[in-house]
Amino acid sequence: MPPVERFVPRFAAEPPQEGLPYGRWEERLQRELQAAWATLQDAPDDLGEPQTIVWYPDRSWHGRTYVPATTTTTGGYELFGYVRFVPSEEGGEPHDLSAHADFTDQTADANPQWSLDLCEEVIGRWRGYNGEEAAMTLVWGRPLVAGGSIVTAELADLAVDQCELADNRFTLIAPDDYRGYLLEIKLWNPKGKRLAMESLYEGDEEESP
């Protein structure tokens, strides 16, 4: 097999290992996330109160598991974030829980042209040749078009991660902003037909084919 032309981390994260949170575990994650939302910096006065939290599939990378979430507020904003923790070993409890949170006024309801509703946060760095760095990015969201079954993250048309939809939600961990290339998120149906594509960057969206 010849050497690869583009040397980047591919499928670096573990696929989802658990179902969507429920019961006492969900309550524990919810407390962490609500505490982070309550201390948001620069939050607008009309932010409002969080509504029901929507959880996304877990992904693990670099010894940490990430469980993302979103919720709308009574003020019309969206709160988003994740809870990070060290997974349990041999039946023990997860530990070192911490949460990251943010907000936006850019919602799917206000942007009917979107085909995918995406959130993202950089969670680390990967160093390549000649000091070039990729931003390892946690991406989570939901399709806004029907018929999809799996979502991929692609860097210059090279698939670097993928996730099957779970209750119409997905989570990815992939390298972004590497050597001038930016991530694109693509939705596929079970027959391998692309249904939608979005860039992580405003203004780079492409209409569904």
Image: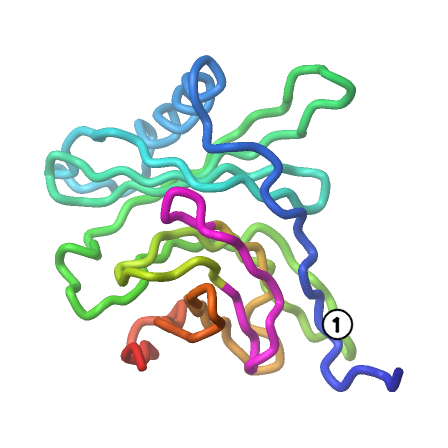
Identify the coloring. rainbow
Q: Quadrant of residue 90?
A: top right
Q: Examine the image and state in which quarter residue 204 appears.
A: bottom left
Query: What residue appears at the point 67 percent right and 60 percent down from the top-left corner?
Result: 11
The answer to whether residue 106 is left or right of residue 61 is left
Tell me: 93 left or right of 114. Answer: right
Quadrant where the N terminus is found in the figure: bottom right
- Residue at (38, 42) in percent of width and height: 167
Three-letter amino acid code of the residue under disc 1? Gly
Looking at the picture, tell me which residue is in the foreground, 110 or 179: 110
Position above or below: 108 against 46:
below
* Mark 1 burial class by Cα count in 10 Å: few <14, some 14-19, many 20+: some
Residue at the spot 76% in from the left edge and 86% down from the top edge: 5
Task: Locate residue 153, reporting x and y percent.
Answer: 52, 66
Q: Is residue 73 left or right of residue 131?
A: left
Badge 1 element = loop
Q: Is residue 111 above or below residue 182?
A: above
The residue located at (43%, 55%) in the rendering is 120
Left/right of residue 64 with respect to residue 107 in the rendered view: right
The location of residue 140, given as percent across then percent down, is: 43, 51
Residue 97, given in percent of the width and then of the height, sits at 57, 25
Judged by its main secondary structure, the magenta piece is strand
Placement of the C terminus among the 4 image quadrants:
bottom left
Q: Which residue is mark 1?
A: 128
Look at the image and say whether residue 60 sits in the magenta stretch.
Answer: no
151 or 40: nearer the viewer = 151
Q: 29 or 122, which lies in front? A: 29
Q: Residue furthest right?
A: 1
Residue 161 within the magenta-colored segment of the rendering: yes
Q: Tell which of 108 and 120 is nearer to you.
A: 108
Give the magenta range.
152-170
Residue 143 % position (x, y): 33, 58
